Amino acid sequence: MHYPDSLEKLIQILKKLPGIGHKSAERFAFQMITWPETILTEMGEIIKNAKKNLNFCAECGALSDFNLCSLCDPTQREIKQMCIVATVKDVFLIEKTRQYHGLYHVLGGLLSPITGCTPDFLSIISLKNRIKKLPLEEVILAIDSTLEGDATALFLKKELKELGIQTSRLALGLPMGSSLDYIDGGTLATAFTGRSTW
Amino acid sequence: MHYPDSLEKLIQILKKLPGIGHKSAERFAFQMITWPETILTEMGEIIKNAKKNLNFCAECGALSDFNLCSLCDPTQREIKQMCIVATVKDVFLIEKTRQYHGLYHVLGGLLSPITGCTPDFLSIISLKNRIKKLPLEEVILAIDSTLEGDATALFLKKELKELGIQTSRLALGLPMGSSLDYIDGGTLATAFTGRSTW
């Protein structure tokens, strides 16, 4: 007994969501067909128009409501620092901390031989041009501490060396509220090396 | 810094999916805005039309491609058994086992004081009418072994008693491939009581 056509189609398209396999997609789909028609229409419209009103800043690559990105505006931001991140979401995560007031640069991903993400897919050329043009004092790599993140950070360090700009990377250590019991040896060792006076 | 309007709307509507909170909805949304416009349009259309071509059988409540439900067709199914399930999805799950060839009846949910699902929301009246009308020998309750499932099964047992029909419920015991180590005491005790000769 097969699923009706429209249900099968729904399950297949829901599987495109990150981390959603066949079982979860089925669960979503069977829930969705119990929703009123109006909610389905609303959701469909929102998804269709999701990108219509989104602008990506031509300068930094972050999401912006208007063509002029407030994150690139020298009257609002300190232009002596630039934070390099992988995705547009990272910009929101860092902005939420209210800790950083400099510029951003969105790479658009991390180097990964498996997914075929080579340097050509990242905004490296525009990054170099911006660094040359701006009166920067520091470039901060706010990049995942993963295999791909480490590879990308190393690559950028090499690429930016010739520009003579000071680069830094986010501190490695214990996450706030964590217990030593649950921390892996690598993190613990790095936290020891990076200890601060107290 | 707030999310752009269309992104915020997307996150809010994705939170309606079962088991999806704010964090997961954000993850979905930020992934979705990297998709090509065509995929978003396709997904939007599929969701809008998800219910358009779905028919629910007026007799058993299961999903059917046509108005005449093949699961209710006496030439294709044994009409001496009826399996009572909570949702349309359960019908597919049972059909996949190829173990059962009788009729179905979809309740449309389980009794739950918390969500406000009272007997009025379930198809109890049509169930009774069908049982009276059909030459049934057995009614099988294929219902979750949860608090809500147990309450619904007990309620149905009482309701169907007056109709003088034999009712049964799915066996409780060890799931196939499971180890005693990981089974709760309640299941183990029930499996002992319900042991079969070997």
Image (cartoon, coloured by chain):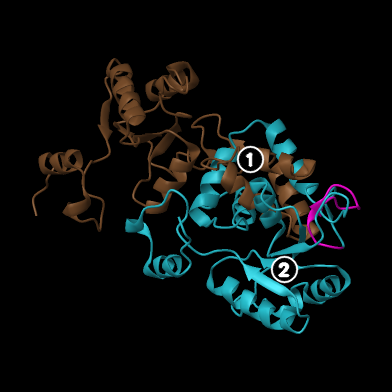
Chain colours: A brown, B cyan
Residue B11's spot in the image, x, y percent?
59, 52
Give the labeled residue for mark 1. A54
Q: Say which mark, if any, is on residue B139.
A: 2
Please determine whether, in this image, residue B167 is positioned above or below residue A133.
below
Residue nearer the viewer, A67 or A117? A117
> Chain ID for label 2?
B
Res. A3 visible in picture: yes
Amino acid on which disc 2 is placed? Val
Q: Determine whether the residue tagged by mark 1 lies in a helix, strand or loop.
A: loop
Residue at image point 79% right, 62% down: B80
**What main secondary structure does the magenta stretch of the protein show?**
loop
Please determine whether, in this image, residue B38 is positioned above or below residue A24.
above
Residue found farthest to the front: B197
Q: Determine whether the residue tagged by mark 2 lies in a helix, strand or loop.
A: strand
Residue at image point 47% right, 16% down: A120
Residue B122's spot in the image, x, y percent?
74, 73
Residue nearer the viewer, B70 or B27? B70
